[in-house]
Image (cartoon, rainbow, N blue to C red):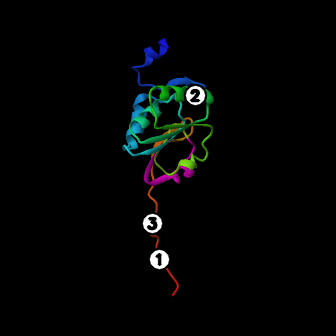
Amino acid sequence: MDRDKEIAHMDQAVAIGHGQTISQPSLVLKMTLSLELKPDSKVLEIATGSGFQTDLLASFSKSVYTVERIEPLHYRAKEKLETAGFTNISFKLGRCKPGVKENAPYDRIMVTAAAEEVPFELVNQLEKGGKMIIPVGSQLNQELRLIKNIKRENFIPLFSKM
Protein backbone atom coordinates (compact mmCIF):
# COMPACT_ATOMS: atom_id res chain seq x y z
CA MET A 1 0.00 0.00 0.00
CA ASP A 2 2.82 2.44 0.80
CA ARG A 3 4.38 1.76 -2.60
CA ASP A 4 1.06 2.68 -4.26
CA LYS A 5 1.13 6.07 -2.54
CA GLU A 6 4.72 6.63 -3.64
CA ILE A 7 3.96 6.09 -7.34
CA ALA A 8 0.42 7.53 -7.46
CA HIS A 9 1.62 10.81 -9.00
CA MET A 10 3.70 9.14 -11.74
CA ASP A 11 2.42 8.69 -15.28
CA GLN A 12 3.56 5.12 -15.79
CA ALA A 13 2.12 1.63 -16.13
CA VAL A 14 1.64 -0.12 -12.78
CA ALA A 15 1.56 -3.82 -11.93
CA ILE A 16 -1.82 -4.93 -10.55
CA GLY A 17 -0.88 -8.54 -9.86
CA HIS A 18 -1.22 -11.82 -11.72
CA GLY A 19 1.21 -10.66 -14.41
CA GLN A 20 -1.06 -7.76 -15.42
CA THR A 21 -0.59 -4.01 -15.50
CA ILE A 22 -2.77 -0.96 -15.78
CA SER A 23 -1.67 1.52 -18.41
CA GLN A 24 -0.29 4.90 -17.44
CA PRO A 25 -3.08 7.37 -16.53
CA SER A 26 -2.43 9.58 -19.58
CA LEU A 27 -3.07 6.61 -21.90
CA VAL A 28 -6.20 5.57 -19.97
CA LEU A 29 -7.49 9.13 -20.37
CA LYS A 30 -6.61 9.26 -24.08
CA MET A 31 -8.42 5.96 -24.71
CA THR A 32 -11.49 7.09 -22.76
CA LEU A 33 -11.72 10.47 -24.47
CA SER A 34 -11.30 8.91 -27.93
CA LEU A 35 -14.55 6.99 -27.46
CA GLU A 36 -16.51 10.24 -27.06
CA LEU A 37 -18.82 8.71 -24.45
CA LYS A 38 -22.36 10.01 -24.09
CA PRO A 39 -24.75 9.74 -21.12
CA ASP A 40 -26.75 7.09 -22.99
CA SER A 41 -23.74 5.05 -24.19
CA LYS A 42 -23.79 1.28 -23.81
CA VAL A 43 -20.16 0.17 -23.43
CA LEU A 44 -18.35 -3.16 -23.56
CA GLU A 45 -14.99 -3.29 -21.80
CA ILE A 46 -12.63 -6.17 -22.49
CA ALA A 47 -10.20 -6.80 -19.59
CA THR A 48 -11.50 -5.17 -16.40
CA GLY A 49 -8.14 -5.39 -14.66
CA SER A 50 -8.09 -3.19 -11.57
CA GLY A 51 -11.39 -1.52 -12.47
CA PHE A 52 -9.82 1.94 -12.89
CA GLN A 53 -10.86 2.20 -16.55
CA THR A 54 -14.26 0.69 -15.70
CA ASP A 55 -14.82 3.47 -13.16
CA LEU A 56 -14.23 6.11 -15.84
CA LEU A 57 -16.44 4.37 -18.39
CA ALA A 58 -19.29 3.93 -15.90
CA SER A 59 -19.02 7.55 -14.74
CA PHE A 60 -19.76 8.85 -18.24
CA SER A 61 -22.04 6.14 -19.71
CA LYS A 62 -25.47 4.65 -19.15
CA SER A 63 -24.22 1.07 -18.85
CA VAL A 64 -20.95 -0.86 -18.91
CA TYR A 65 -20.51 -4.57 -19.53
CA THR A 66 -17.04 -5.58 -18.42
CA VAL A 67 -15.22 -8.90 -18.76
CA GLU A 68 -12.14 -10.15 -16.90
CA ARG A 69 -10.56 -13.58 -17.33
CA ILE A 70 -8.43 -13.56 -14.16
CA GLU A 71 -10.65 -14.49 -11.23
CA PRO A 72 -8.90 -12.57 -8.40
CA LEU A 73 -8.82 -9.37 -10.51
CA HIS A 74 -12.48 -9.81 -11.44
CA TYR A 75 -13.65 -10.13 -7.83
CA ARG A 76 -11.39 -7.36 -6.53
CA ALA A 77 -12.60 -4.88 -9.18
CA LYS A 78 -16.23 -5.91 -8.72
CA GLU A 79 -16.07 -5.42 -4.96
CA LYS A 80 -14.29 -2.07 -5.29
CA LEU A 81 -16.73 -0.67 -7.86
CA GLU A 82 -19.86 -1.93 -6.11
CA THR A 83 -18.58 -0.49 -2.81
CA ALA A 84 -18.07 2.82 -4.63
CA GLY A 85 -21.79 2.76 -5.46
CA PHE A 86 -21.79 1.92 -9.16
CA THR A 87 -25.03 0.27 -10.23
CA ASN A 88 -24.63 0.55 -14.00
CA ILE A 89 -21.86 -2.06 -14.37
CA SER A 90 -22.44 -5.71 -15.31
CA PHE A 91 -19.46 -7.94 -14.50
CA LYS A 92 -18.54 -11.15 -16.29
CA LEU A 93 -15.78 -13.59 -15.36
CA GLY A 94 -14.18 -15.55 -18.18
CA ARG A 95 -12.78 -15.26 -21.65
CA CYS A 96 -14.63 -12.96 -23.97
CA LYS A 97 -13.98 -14.50 -27.36
CA PRO A 98 -15.65 -13.39 -29.51
CA GLY A 99 -16.93 -10.59 -27.32
CA VAL A 100 -20.16 -10.60 -25.33
CA LYS A 101 -22.84 -11.15 -27.93
CA GLU A 102 -25.76 -11.48 -25.49
CA ASN A 103 -25.73 -7.73 -24.78
CA ALA A 104 -24.73 -6.52 -28.25
CA PRO A 105 -24.83 -4.20 -30.03
CA TYR A 106 -22.69 -1.72 -28.12
CA ASP A 107 -22.23 1.99 -28.78
CA ARG A 108 -18.62 1.80 -27.63
CA ILE A 109 -16.07 -0.96 -27.02
CA MET A 110 -12.93 -0.47 -24.92
CA VAL A 111 -10.28 -3.17 -25.25
CA THR A 112 -7.47 -2.71 -22.77
CA ALA A 113 -5.57 -5.92 -23.59
CA ALA A 114 -3.54 -5.92 -26.80
CA ALA A 115 -4.58 -8.10 -29.73
CA GLU A 116 -2.39 -9.22 -32.63
CA GLU A 117 -5.09 -8.06 -35.03
CA VAL A 118 -8.47 -6.35 -34.83
CA PRO A 119 -11.08 -8.96 -33.84
CA PHE A 120 -13.83 -8.42 -36.40
CA GLU A 121 -16.26 -10.30 -34.17
CA LEU A 122 -16.05 -7.28 -31.87
CA VAL A 123 -16.45 -4.82 -34.75
CA ASN A 124 -19.64 -6.67 -35.67
CA GLN A 125 -20.95 -6.09 -32.13
CA LEU A 126 -20.77 -2.32 -32.57
CA GLU A 127 -23.94 -0.34 -33.15
CA LYS A 128 -24.05 1.62 -36.40
CA GLY A 129 -21.84 4.64 -35.79
CA GLY A 130 -20.17 2.91 -32.83
CA LYS A 131 -16.49 3.19 -31.88
CA MET A 132 -13.92 0.77 -30.53
CA ILE A 133 -10.47 1.57 -29.16
CA ILE A 134 -7.93 -1.26 -29.08
CA PRO A 135 -4.15 -1.71 -28.83
CA VAL A 136 -3.02 -3.86 -31.79
CA GLY A 137 0.31 -5.50 -32.55
CA SER A 138 3.02 -7.68 -31.11
CA GLN A 139 4.36 -7.47 -27.59
CA LEU A 140 7.22 -5.27 -28.85
CA ASN A 141 5.37 -3.14 -31.40
CA GLN A 142 1.83 -1.94 -30.70
CA GLU A 143 -0.36 0.89 -31.88
CA LEU A 144 -3.60 2.21 -30.53
CA ARG A 145 -6.40 1.97 -33.08
CA LEU A 146 -9.77 3.66 -33.15
CA ILE A 147 -12.27 1.62 -35.14
CA LYS A 148 -15.48 3.21 -36.36
CA ASN A 149 -18.33 0.99 -37.46
CA ILE A 150 -20.20 2.43 -40.38
CA LYS A 151 -22.46 -0.28 -41.75
CA ARG A 152 -23.29 -0.30 -45.42
CA GLU A 153 -26.97 0.24 -46.17
CA ASN A 154 -29.14 0.28 -49.28
CA PHE A 155 -26.70 -1.68 -51.40
CA ILE A 156 -27.58 -1.29 -55.07
CA PRO A 157 -26.04 -3.62 -57.66
CA LEU A 158 -24.08 -1.83 -60.38
CA PHE A 159 -25.11 -4.36 -63.00
CA SER A 160 -28.38 -6.18 -63.37
CA LYS A 161 -29.86 -8.53 -65.94
CA MET A 162 -32.90 -7.29 -67.77
Left or right of 10 on screen, residue 123 = right
Q: What amino acid is found at the position of numbered circle 2 in the picture?
A: Tyr
Task: Mark yes or no: residue 161 visible.
Answer: yes
Q: Are marks 3 and 2 in contact (CB under 8 Å)?
A: no
* Residue bearing mark 1: 158
Callout 3: few (<14), some (14-19), or many (20+) C-alpha neighbours within 10 Å? Answer: few
Callout 1: few (<14), some (14-19), or many (20+) C-alpha neighbours within 10 Å? Answer: few
Q: What amino acid is found at the position of numbered circle 3 in the picture?
A: Glu
Q: Nearer the viewer, mark 1 or mark 2?
A: 2
- Range of the magenta residues? 115-134
In the rendered image, the vertical position of residue 11 relative to residue 155, given as above or below: above
Q: Which of marks 2 and 1 precedes in the sequence? A: 2
Q: Are marks 1 and 2 in contact (CB under 8 Å)?
A: no
Q: Find the distance from the CA under tag 3 to the CA under tag 2.
A: 42 Å
In the rendered image, the vertical position of residue 120 relative to residue 10, given as above or below: below
* Residue bearing mark 2: 75
* Residue bearing mark 3: 153
Q: Find the distance from the CA under tag 1 to the CA under tag 3.
A: 15 Å
